Image: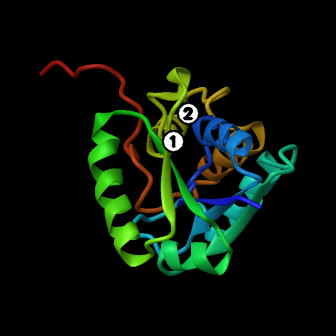
Amino acid sequence: MKIALYPGTFDPLTNGHVSLIRRGCEVFDQIIVAVADNTPKHPLFSQKERVALASEALRAEPKAVVEPFAGLTVEYAVRRGACALLRGLRAVSDFEYEFQLALMNRRLQRHIQTVFLMTDYQWLFISSTMVKAAASQGADIKGLVPENIRHALEEKYHKGEVRQGTPCLAPPFNGFRVT
């Protein structure tokens, strides 16, 4: 069985991530969506919440399994029997970082391959950070994230449950002030 590990923070999982997972499932027998705990980012959602949200969003995809993980990604991949790390590329700016990461992972675990899939064109502009920024300002994010995640984001921001990692915490822009 060919297993790929798709690691990430997934704070939150976007439709770009979902598209990549579904396409990965056409190549691999199973995709383990590995939700990272030890991240330098300051996630809006806890790891437990991110795992639950991603699991619900991917429930119709039988080849996708969502799991929490901590530690080195390639070590987790070895423990789970993965032969590859699945990574998405949106633009040239993603490539430089992902290329360096792939080389380091290859150095650490020679038999774990990194497989890059280009993001579908309709998701090129999407990132979890941009989705949070828009949602934090009350923008309509329908169609950018799975519906369960859209509702969870709206609830978080409605309740005022924001963390340092949430961009655009200032009130919405109301135009220029003339002095």
Residue drawn at the location 55% of the way across and 38% of the way down = 135
Q: Residues within 10 Å of mark 2 (few under 14, many from 20)?
A: few
What is the secondary structure assignment of the residue under circle 1? helix
Percent position (x, y) of residue 124? Answer: 46, 28
User: In the drawing, what numbered circle is on residue 138?
Assistant: 2
Q: Nearer the viewer, residue 88 or 67?
A: 88
Residue 171 in which image quadrant:
top left
Left or right of 125 in this view: 101: left
Percent position (x, y) of residue 7? Answer: 55, 61
Vertical comparison of 161 with 71: above or below: above
Vertical comparison of 123 with 26: above or below: above
Residue drawn at the location 44% of the way across and 65% of the way down = 42
Q: Nearer the viewer, residue 33 or 2?
A: 2
Q: Residues within 10 Å of mark 1 (few under 14, many from 20)?
A: many
Vertical comparison of 73 with 54: above or below: below
Tell me the kind of residue under disc 2. Gly
Residue located beneath label 1 in the image:
136
Residue drawn at the location 87% of the way across and 43% of the way down = 60
Vertical comparison of 37 with 86: above or below: below
Separation of residues labelled 1 and 2 (CA atoms) = 6 Å
In the rendered image, which quarter contains the C terminus?
Answer: top left
Marks 1,2: beta carbons within 8 A: yes
